[in-house]
Amino acid sequence: MRYLILSDIHSNHEALSAVLARVRRKRWDRAIVLGDVVGYGANPNQAVDLVRALKPLVAIRGNHDKVCAGIESGEMFNRVALQAALWTRQRLSPSNLRWLQSLPEGPVVVDGAFAVAHGTPIDEDAYIFGEIEALNVFRQTSFPLCFFGHSHFPVIFGLSPDAIQTVLTRSPSFRFRLEPGLRYLVNPGSIGQPRDGNPLASFAMFDSGTRVVSVYRVPYRIERAQKKILGAGLPRPLADRLALGR
Ligand SMILES: [Fe+2]
């Protein structure tokens, strides 16, 4: 099976459209969305519509989806994130609001092949930034392979019986074969708001037959997404950071 793995779209219609155009001629059997379809960007309904059209689809909720859908109040959010979430909540169509509210909490196991989580499979709102957090997750779970998002940068953590290994991905496309017997935590990066210093949209494909993870970086019309954010009256830092990739 070939999986299309998308995360942290954040209402960025331009970035998601560019990614979907890139995969149009690629074969994939199932789309996986690791949460944060909305929040920050100016096109929440367009982003949800594009995700809902992916079939078959396994999607889980992210922390921004929860606040934008009114499941949580967002008291832990910073001012900019909360402002964008409340703006989003007012604009979501009733159907898209219900769809976001219905997204399950991770971890969810897909086809018996791997788990998916937003932040971590222990706590959907927690972050895996580095090896300390990754090791903690490996110790407290038993999934051989888990895809996660939330931190907005593509990375692969591998655990062998005696060491943890961090694999940083490289642009514009990066292939990594998962070794048998090792456990892995894999972040495909963020489509709508990358934070690894590279502003290009990031997503992954996973072939469960060959066990190859491929991470791709895709250029998109950043200026157009920025103009929409400013035109909507959303905070300027949300537009500025898109060009910086952080
Ligand atoms: Fe996010």
Image: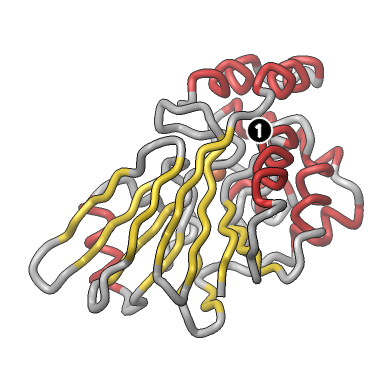
Q: Is residue 214 above or below residue 140?
A: above
Left or right of 149: which side holds 240? right
Left or right of 109: which side holds 15? right
Q: Residue at x 21, y 66 (%)?
A: 159
Q: Nearer the viewer, residue 63 or 206?
A: 206
**In the rendered image, which residue does mark 1 sit on?**
40
Quarter for ligand 1?
Answer: top right
As drawn, the residue found furthest toward the front would be 25
Q: In this view, does 194 lie above or below 151?
A: above
Q: Quadrant of the N terminus?
A: bottom right
Mark 1 beta carbon near ligand 1 (under 8 Å): yes
Under mark 1, the amino acid is Tyr
- Image coordinates for residue 70, horizontal then vertical, percent: 74, 51
Q: Which of 125 and 146 is in front in this view?
A: 146
Q: Which residue is drawn at 51% across and 27% down?
A: 199
Q: Residue at x 43, y 53 (%)?
A: 187
As drawn, the residue found furthest toward the bottom would be 112
Q: Quadrant of residue 99?
A: bottom right
